[in-house]
Image (cartoon, rainbow, N blue to C red):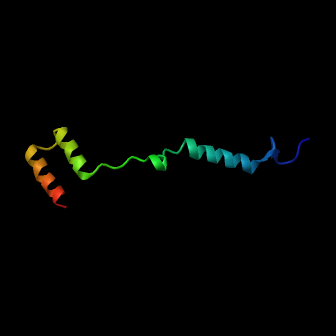
Amino acid sequence: MFYANYYWGMNLIWWIAWVILLFWIFAIPYDIPGQRKKKDSPLKLLQRRFVLGQISAEEYNEKKKYLQAD
């Protein structure tokens, strides 16, 4: 038996709700709240810049002293 405005046992609004829910779960590129990556500390960023050769040893030591003073 076919009922008006029913699609395989669900109203059209429920199909729309399921599509939106599935889109939200799979297509939106947000991290899972419990698994978010922690941002690096300023000291870690400074160490990375030193290792990559973006700053000199003198500049590294000067900025490291400043960061550790805080």
Number of marks in the rendered image:
0
Image location (x, y in percent) of residue 15: 72, 46
Q: Is residue 33 left or right of residue 53?
A: right
Depth check, front residue: 68 or 5: 68
Q: Residue furthest top?
A: 52
Q: Residue at x 17, y 56 (%)?
A: 68
Query: Quadrant where the C terminus lies?
Result: bottom left
The residue under the point 22% across, 50% down is 43
In this rendering, the answer to whether 54 lies above or below 69 is: above
Quadrant in the picture for the N terminus: top right
Q: Residue reaching furthest right?
A: 1
Name the spot of residue 66 as percent of width and height, x first: 14, 57
Q: Is residue 9 left or right of residue 35?
A: right
State the residue at coordinates (39%, 46%): 37
Q: Residue at x 76, y 48 (%)?
A: 12
Q: Position of residue 25 (x, y in %)?
A: 57, 44
Q: Is residue 9 left or right of residue 23?
A: right
* Residue 41: image location, x then y, percent: 27, 51
Q: Residue furthest bottom?
A: 70
